[in-house]
Image (cartoon, grey):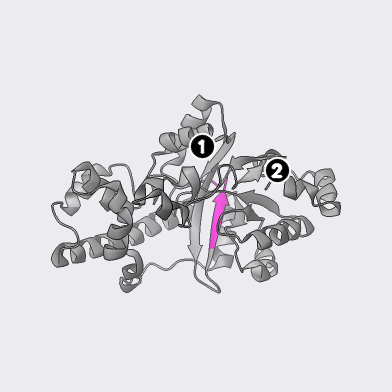
Amino acid sequence: MKLYANLHLHSTHSDGPYTPKQLACVARDEGYGALALTDHDTVSGCGQMEAACNELGMKFIFGAEFTVKEPQRFHIVGFDFDPDYKPMREYLDRLSEKETHQTRVLFERAIQDGGISGITWQEVLDYNRGITWLCNNHVFAAMKAKGLVRQSEYMEFFHKNYGAKRSTVKSDIRQKTSGELIELIHKAGGIAVLAHPNNQLQYVPMLIEQGLDGIEVWHPDVKKEQQLEAFELALRKDLFISGGSDHSGLCGGYYDSYPSREALLASSHYIQPMSAGTTREFFNELKTRKKDLELRNQCLKDTAFYHACK
C-alpha cells in the first residue's frame, strides 16, 4: 500500500507560499490523489482548494489547524466541520484578528528598526486581499511582489523580524483549551485529529476522554520510531489515521527559500516525495466516517501494511 492523501497542508491563506490552486497542482504532480487544506485558524482558502481538486480529478476534505496551549501545547486539525456554525465562525474571526494584530505590531517595530523598509502596512493589506489571517508570510509576499526581497532571503527575514519575537506581542483573545476546542469542532459537526504528535502520544488517552477522533501518523515532525507506535495506538483506540507534509516537502513550498541544495538537504523542510500523508483506505474512513474493521484487525495482527506505506 502507498500513501495517497496529503491531509495537512497550508496555503497563502495562512503561512504557506502557494495559493490553494497552485498547491493542488503541486500535490497532484507529486502523486497525491486526495487533499485537505488545513490553514491555521481559517477556512478562507478551502473553497478555492475544493474547486481546484474537482478540476484536477482529486478528492478533497475540508479542514483547519488550531493551536491549543492548555493543558498542554497541541495542534489539532478539525475536518469536515460547518464553518458557518455561529460559535465556530466567531472563534475563527477572533483568531484571525489575533494573528493579524500581532503581525502588524511586529511589522511596525521592524519598520522602526530598519528590518523592513520600502513598504507600508496598507500595501500589505492590498496585496493580500481576501485573506483574513495575516502573518509574516504575507508581509514577505508583498515585499517580494515589489521587488524588495528574493525568495532565498525568506529565512533571514523571518528570524530577523518575526520568529521568536511573536511571543512578545500579547493579546486579550484567548485560545481554547483542548477540551473546549474538541467540543467546538464536534458541535460544528466535525472530526478532531491530533496533529504531529511527536513526544505527545502519552497525552492521547486524556484527549480521547475529551473526544479526540484521530491522530496523524505519517508526518515529517513525527520521529520514525514513533510513527509505528502512533499507528498501532490509533488502531487500538479506534481512532482515524491521518497525516500530511505540513511545511515540509514539495507541497511545503519552502525549497526555494534556501541558498543552496546542501542547505536545503540539511534542513527540516526536505523530505522524500510521497513520504507524508495517509493511505486511500484511511482517507476513505475519514471521508465517510466509517471504519474498515476488517482492515484494522489485519493491521493489528501484522505490521506489514504500515511498513508498505513508508
- Could you say where residue 133 lies in the image, as x and y percent from the top left? 35, 52
Q: Which residue is mark 2?
A: 285
- Compared to 288, does 224 lie above or below? below
Foreground mark, 2 or 1?
Answer: 1
Magenta-span inclusion, residue 85: no
| Residue 118 placement, left or right of 268 | left
Q: In which quarter of the view is residue 60 placed?
A: top right
Is residue 194 visible in the rendered image? The answer is: yes
Residue nearest the observer in this picture, 38 or 252: 252
Would you say residue 135 is visible in this rendering? no
Type of residue at label 1?
Answer: Ala
| Segment colored magenta | 75-84
Q: Which mark is residue 27?
A: 1
Mark 2 or mark 1: whose residue is earlier in sequence: 1
Q: Residue 192: x, y in percent? A: 60, 55
Q: CA distance from mark 2 to mark 1?
A: 21 Å
From the viewer's perspective, tell me whether residue 31 is left or right of residue 289: left
Which residue corresponds to the image point at 45% horizontal and 46% vertical from the top-left? 43
* Residue 161 x %, y %: 26, 63
Which residue is the extreme one toward the front? 262
| Label 2 close to label 1 by CB (< 8 Å) | no
Q: Is residue 78 magenta?
A: yes
| Image point (57%, 34%), residue name | 31
Residue at 58% over, 53% down: 219
- Residue at point 14%, 66% (across, down): 112
Q: Which mark is residue 169?
A: none
